Image: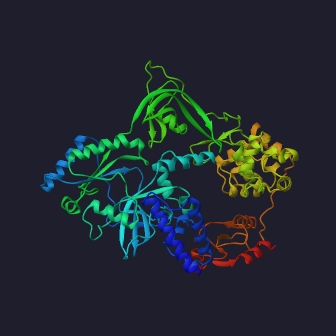
Amino acid sequence: MRPSREISDLTVLLRKYNSQYYTENASDITDAEYDALMNRLLYLEREYPELRSDDSPTARVGSAPLASFAAVTHDPPMLSLSNLFSREDFLAFHSRITSQLGADQVEYSVEPKLDGVSLSLVYENSVLVRAGTRGDGIRGEDVTENARTIRSIPLKLNSDHPVNVEIRGEVFFMTKDFLQMNGRRTEAGEAPFANPRNATSGSLRQLDSAVTAGRPLSFIAYAPGYVPAGIDSQEGLFNRLQQWGFSVNSRNSICRTPEQVIQTYHKLVDAREDLPMEIDGMVIKLNSFSRREMIGFISRAPRWAAAWKFHAEEMTTTLTEIEVQVGRTGRLTPVARLDPVKVGGVVVTSATLHNQDEISRKDARAGDIVLVRRAGDVIPEVVKSLSPEDGVRGELFKMPDKCPVCSGPVVQPEGEVNLYCINPSCEARIRRSLEHWASRKALDIEGLGKKLCEQLVDAGMVISIADLYNLKYHELTALERMGELKATKLFAELKKSRKTSLSRFLTGLGIPGVGEVASRDIAGEFRDLEALGAATEEELTAVKGIGPITAVSVRNFFTNPVTAAVVGELKAAGFNPTEKTAREGTSLAGETIVFTGALEMPRLKAKQLAMAAGAKVTSSITGKTTLLVAGENAGSKLKKAENSGVKVVSEEEFLVKVKEE
């Protein structure tokens, strides 16, 4: 089959299955079969990039990171809604509507109010060409590449003739998707998102759309920019939206009396816990578009619509104690232990206090009566602390200056409110530390992946990083799926890792605030482990790019008895890392390089070669870029570099420059 024909057929199939899944809640194929089709299309488009269309289903996986978001202007503006908080508020709203219309009866479209982020989608000739956040209602941010990764947003409308239209709706997380995502983040040692609303906003505003693609966002449509021809009501709009391939809320309803609206409100309140997504109220709109025109607008909101908001359920209970938990990244999180209380249908026994700043702001202490609610109706949180009944309060809480698990030092990285244990051999974070130590950016130990790290820790064979270098052959081969060949290769990799550079060694230690770039800068200044271990805070701060907080973090690591012991154990295991200076005589010294296209070597290796030769590597073309290394199928970066006069070289030419003395 010709590539063009196969790409066309795959595109049609994937659009069909997307529509089934998101608008019909059904699918003719399994997830694995869908993934196989998507992977085949990705392969073909990589081989024949000229055949890829803007509305290809592969846009769901993301594109190259952006330097920043462009601005979009909304015409008409994306207005906000007036709020109602009671039956009396609604009846006053209804009375004003009927009075202005001179009508005894009106129809309302009543829709659950999703607690997400508003989004505008512009289609030209039925193809999605622009997506913009609400912003201030007049100007928002262009998040088109991110919107294309959301599978419930049609990339092309189902229509027999080309359609030019703007559709507005809400981006949000289904509750099960949000909880599963948070579970995966916790398992990976990452901080869970506090609530679906904030997570949605952050996910939609990622400069790297591949990050957005990895988060299970959903979209529901509910309004046009300007009303499309042939539609005269909200009910008719929803029918047309579904025909085009959009999801609409199944709980939308048409109410013909104020009593029906009030009944719908109470039904939604009762059903709220069982709905598949978070809602914070319901939106009431005149169903008739001609009547909306008669009612008109005020400056920032339509007169013909309002949001009847729910009250968040809050309950009081006793805060019995504050514990500090240590996550797999070393982050210390204070947790309030509570007398059991039912909040929003769920029994709550603990709630996050986030960090020291939040505890101080809420003045929460053991023994206090506290007000508790479920943030975003998912994660319990303490809202505020109340005076205990007897008036006697416990001591002010202060976060510890030592890790409660290993007694190692804790630091607060620059620009963060959280504290972290910096001991890579801390029992609470050892699995994550081993993975990081073996990663390509650090020691690059092939064969030491996540699964093996977990096996080694669970079997009690490794309780510190240095234990890797004391493993016995017969112990290793006794592990599941660890044959003699794998064990032999791993021992060879461990032996090779002892010859690592100081910058990789420092990266591998995982000191907060000291990433790959900072490690290289510090290592280039001090050159060997002995000199770095003896460095003062003043000397560390003098290194370009190293601030006082990072300097304190590094100094603490090499002087605290717990973490200094880790370094000592590694030295005893055969480590004596040093750093070569960047070769100033090479033609890459001082260059600012961007890589694009498919390279023969791994992108990370190319980046490391460039940095070792004295160059700086960035991800996007800017005014400071001096060199673009272009591999196969180079895209927009190549064109931008050529237009900007940036020098372009091939991978082979880059390797020649790296080897120059």
Instruction: Work out whether 437 lies above or below 14.
Output: above
Residue 649 in percent (x, y) is at 69, 78
**Given the current orientation, which residue lies at the most extreme top position?**
390
Where, quadrant-wise, is the N terminus in this rendering? bottom right
Instruction: Work out whether 192 lies above or below 296.
Output: above
Instruction: Work out whether 418 lies above or below 395.
Output: below
Residue 614 in percent (x, y) is at 73, 66
Residue depicted at 70% across the width and 53% down the height: 542
Q: How is the image coloured?
A: rainbow
Rendering quarter of residue 242: bottom left
Residue depicted at 65% across the width and 35% down the height: 401
Residue depicted at 59% across the width and 79% down the height: 3
Residue 466 in percent (x, y) is at 81, 44
Rendering quarter of residue 136: bottom left
Residue 539 visible somewhere in the drawing: no
Position of 250 compared to 94: left or right? Answer: right
Residue 93 in percent (x, y) is at 21, 48
Where, quadrant-wise, is the C terminus in this rendering? bottom right
The total of numbered circles placed on residues is 0
Position of 367 compared to 224: left or right? Answer: right
